[in-house]
Image (cartoon, rainbow, N blue to C red):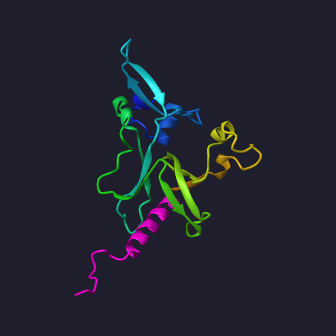
């Protein structure tokens, strides 16, 4: 319908235009492809095929645009995709960071983070596990995946909480606070270029 009306892709239909085209319709169902991005692949054994996949992510970059009209711009997340996916048209940084944006921080898989009560979490080291466009999931450093722990008979399932129950979701605000705490620590360290006082 949007093509017939000459509307750009991914834009809502104006209410008046929708009512004139479909007078009896009160709700319009829009299909969104579940399961990830759609991309084309040309195999060696046949015609080009349309595939749908949720590309893996190796990390995230938190960034924001300059302030607009006295308001602080909301932080945005771009995911770092594995390089081999570039062959299928999946960009390395997805979505691309806009020109003029300030990068607030970067986090990669298996990176260790120190979180504490000042950030609202139990004190300890955490390992980055998964990334999405809404944040990151981290695990305590001593967490072992349940499947591996069961195979190695390190514990019985009822002895300790499952790894998934120990996961911590870091949203955009949590990530902003974490990267700001790192900057504060860097600012508090004495400069190594200062004079030693020896003469």
Counting from the top left corner in percent of width and height, residue 3 is at: 40, 29
User: Is 131 displayed left or right of 67 in the figure?
Assistant: right
| Quarter of the image where the C terminus is located | bottom left
Q: Nearer the viewer, residue 28 or 100?
A: 100
Counting from the top left corner in percent of width and height, residue 128 is at: 51, 51
Residue lying farthest right?
A: 158
Residue lying farthest front?
A: 199
Q: Write down the quadrant of residue 80 in the picture.
A: top left
Q: How many marks?
A: 0
Q: Nearer the viewer, residue 198 or 167?
A: 198
Residue sitting at x 36%, y 19%: 42
Could one spot residue 160 in this view of the protein? yes
Residue lying farthest left?
A: 199
Q: Is residue 190 magenta?
A: yes
Counting from the top left corner in percent of width and height, residue 4 is at: 41, 28
Could one spot residue 136 in this view of the protein? no
Q: Is residue 197 magenta?
A: yes
Residue sitting at x 26%, y 82%: 195
Q: Is residue 155 above or below residue 168?
A: above
Please report the bounds of the magenta region as a residue range: 173-199
Q: Nearer the viewer, residue 58 or 171?
A: 58
Residue sitting at x 43%, y 40%: 11
């Amino acid at each position: 319908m949007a093509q017939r009306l000459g509307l750009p892709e991914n834009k809502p239909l104006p209410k008046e235009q929708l009512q004139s085209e479909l007078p009896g319709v009160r709700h319009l169902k829009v299909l969104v492809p579940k399961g990830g991005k759609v991309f084309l692949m040309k195999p060696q054994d046949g015609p080009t095929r349309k595939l749908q996949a949720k590309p893996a992510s190796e990390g995230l970059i938190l960034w924001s645009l300059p302030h607009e009209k006295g308001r602080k711009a909301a932080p945005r997340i771009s995911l770092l995709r594995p390089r081999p996916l570039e062959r299928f048209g999946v960009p390395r940084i997805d979505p691309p960071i806009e020109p003029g944006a300030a990068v607030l921080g970067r986090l990669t898989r298996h990176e260790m983070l120190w979180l504490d009560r000042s950030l609202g979490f139990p004190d300890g080291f955490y390992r980055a596990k998964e990334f999405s466009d809404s944040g990151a999931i981290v695990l305590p450093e001593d967490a072992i995946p349940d499947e591996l722990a069961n195979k190695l008979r390190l514990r019985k399932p009822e002895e300790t909480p499952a790894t998934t129950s120990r996961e911590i979701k870091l949203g955009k605000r949590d990530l902003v606070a974490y990267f700001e705490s790192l900057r504060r620590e860097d600012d508090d360290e004495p400069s190594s270029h200062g004079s030693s006082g020896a003469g």
